[in-house]
Amino acid sequence: MPTVGLFIPCYVDQLYPRVGMATVELLEERGYRVEFPTGQTCCGQPMANTGCTAEARPLAERFLELFGKYEYVVAPSGSCVAMVRCHYDEYLAGRPGFEELKAKTFELTEFLVDVAKVDRFSRRFPHRVGLHQSCHGLRELRLGSSSERMVAHYSKAEKLLRMLDGVQLVPLARADECCGFGGTFAVAEEAVSCMMGDDRIHDHESAGAEVITAGDMSCLMHLEGLIRRQHKPLRVMHLAEILAGDKL
């Protein structure tokens, strides 16, 4: 039985643990043994984004130490996986096992589509869903096509969602636009961040969405805060929660 090392982002661990449990359920259903290394820490992305290289380096080293032994590493977060695959070179280039770590680290929907080869779900989700594609997953991991590239449309998350019974994916006017979170950007540029988030929410509302979903809980956390403050009837759910939902 193949073993997956499960990496859980900080905000999922502290605020949305149900996303982690849904991820475990999805992986175990596909025949994978899931292990959660309890010594795991933040991937270091917040520190790296603010230029704190010295603080990010030991976290990258810790990630390699803990997860290098697994056959696969999976995280329900495009931004954390992008940190490992696209930005750890600054800290770990030349280290034994680093190139192998990059090659075997996957975002959840990417793993389900490309490695587990999921082609059906015996589950239902009879709701109108708006799919938010986070920037890191879209433009660094290429989990879907983006409007600035002349390629045929594809989306790994959309492919999985369409396997659910009763789901209605609503068409967005700007399907690959940033939500405005951006980690520390939301703190340093609060007004701009909120305006960008409001734009995304309005797009989903106009399309008739009942639920906004994404592969990054950080984006959804930002949108959820704006939705709650404005008392809007929209819900946010991570893709893992929807995919591991009601069985037929």
Image (cartoon, rainbow, N blue to C red):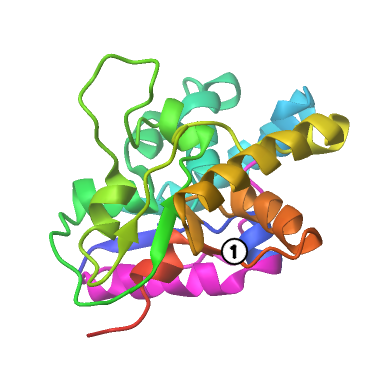
The residue lying at 70 percent from left, 58 percent from top is: 227
Instruction: Estimate the x, y position of residue 57 in percent, counting from the top left.
Output: 68, 31
Decide if residue 130 is on the left or right side of residue 191: left
In the image, which residues are magenta?
15-43
Decide if residue 132 is on the left or right side of residue 195: left
Considering the image in quadrants, where does the C terminus appear? bottom left
Please state which of residues 36 and 78 is positioned toward the viewer in this rendering. 78
Decide if residue 22 is on the left or right side of residue 181: left
Hey, which quadrant is residue 91 in on the image? top right
Please state which of residues 200 and 148 is positioned toward the viewer in this rendering. 200
Query: Is 239 drawn above or below residue 114 in the view shown?
Result: below
Residue 201 lies in the magenta-colored region? no
Query: Is 89 drawn above or below residue 73 in the view shown?
Result: above
Instruction: Estimate the x, y position of residue 77 in percent, counting from the top left.
Output: 50, 49
Query: Is 35 drawn above or below residue 104 in the view shown?
Result: below
Number of numbered discs present? Answer: 1
Around disc 1, counting alpha carbons within 10 Å, would you say few (fewer than 14), some (14 to 19), or many (20 or more)?
some
The residue lying at 46 percent from left, 41 percent from top is: 133
Q: Amino acid at mark 1?
A: Leu
Instruction: Report helix, strand or loop for mark 1.
Output: loop
Instruction: Estimate the x, y position of residue 179 in percent, counting from the top left.
Output: 62, 38
The residue lying at 33 percent from left, 51 percent from top is: 109
In the picture of the structure, the residue carrying the numbered disc 1 is 234
Q: Is residue 129 visible?
A: yes
